[in-house]
Amino acid sequence: MKFVAFERAKQGTGASRRLRNVGKTPGILYGGTGEPQQIELDHNALWHALKKEAFHSTILEMDLGGATSKVLLRDVQYHPFRQQVQHVDFQRVDANTRLHMKVPLHYKNAEESDAVKVDHCLVNPVMTELDISCLPGDLPEFIEVDLSGIKKGTSLHLQDVQLPKGVKAVTHGKPNPVLVSVVTPAAEESAEAAAEGAAAAPAAAADAKGAAAKAAPAKAGKDAAAKPAAAKPAAKAPAKK
């Protein structure tokens, strides 16, 4: 993707505020062999470009002062409640230096899997993007993951996915994270639990009846032992003369 940027002469909070007021977005270009360079972009063009997935995950061509540079979008700062981009950062790309990027995961064919077609399960993505390391020439726009073979009671892990050539996953200490999980629908789980409960009810009732029968004689003996002897009638008082 190509976009146009312009050199920014003035710096500081006040200068950036004035740029935003006239429909511009301040930014910075850094990295590579050059010095950090202050830039500005047309806000509306940038706003629409940021809505495209490729603008976040591919190498871009920046036209700056008549020269074209290959760059990556590194950071975007948005206004807390307005539809406004406050600041944007780009990094120059060196063809011989490995990049560390996050790229989207595109899942496909879940509806063709046995988990969905036969068992009516829900296929839930656990990760929607993946941290990768690669050379600029090997950077993919996204990584496609085929879910047609997923089954009930299973999960799809990173090691189950074939990454593009030259791309390595950066897992931050988790060697084989879960990408997709298969979940049984809540209605089916409730039905299974109800069926198990119904099957267990007769056995539980029989056990309770047996326990009650065993407890009855013991209780009767205890009641008899605890019952006090009948009180003798009180002596009749002598009649008065």
Image (spheres, rainbow, N blue to C red):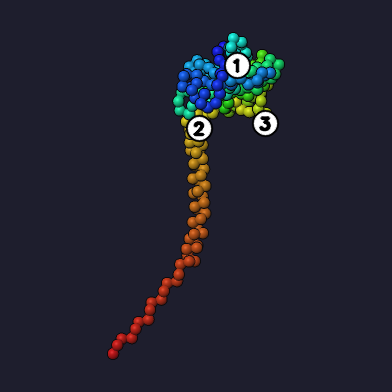
Asked whether 90 or 115 is in front, the reply is: 90
**Is mark 2 in CB contact (under 8 Å) with mark 1?**
no
Q: Earlier in the sequence, mark 2 or mark 1?
A: 1
Which one is in front in this view, the residue at disc 2 or the one at disc 1? 1
Left or right of residue 97, residue 81 in this image:
left
Q: Is residue 209 left or right of residue 172?
A: left
Which is closer to the viewer, label 1 or label 3? Answer: 1
Q: Residue at x 49, y 66 (%)?
A: 225
Identify the element where label 3 is drawn. Answer: loop
Q: Badge 2 local density, few (<14 within 10 Å), some, or many (20+)?
A: few
Q: Tell which residue pokes out farthest to the bottom in this image.
A: 241
Looking at the rendered structure, the kind of residue marked 3 is Gly
* Secondary structure under the numbered disc 2 in the rendered image: helix
The residue at which mark 2 appears reads as 189
The dot on residue 94 is none
Where residue 217 appears, x then y in whole percent? 50, 58
| Residue marked by disc 3 | 173
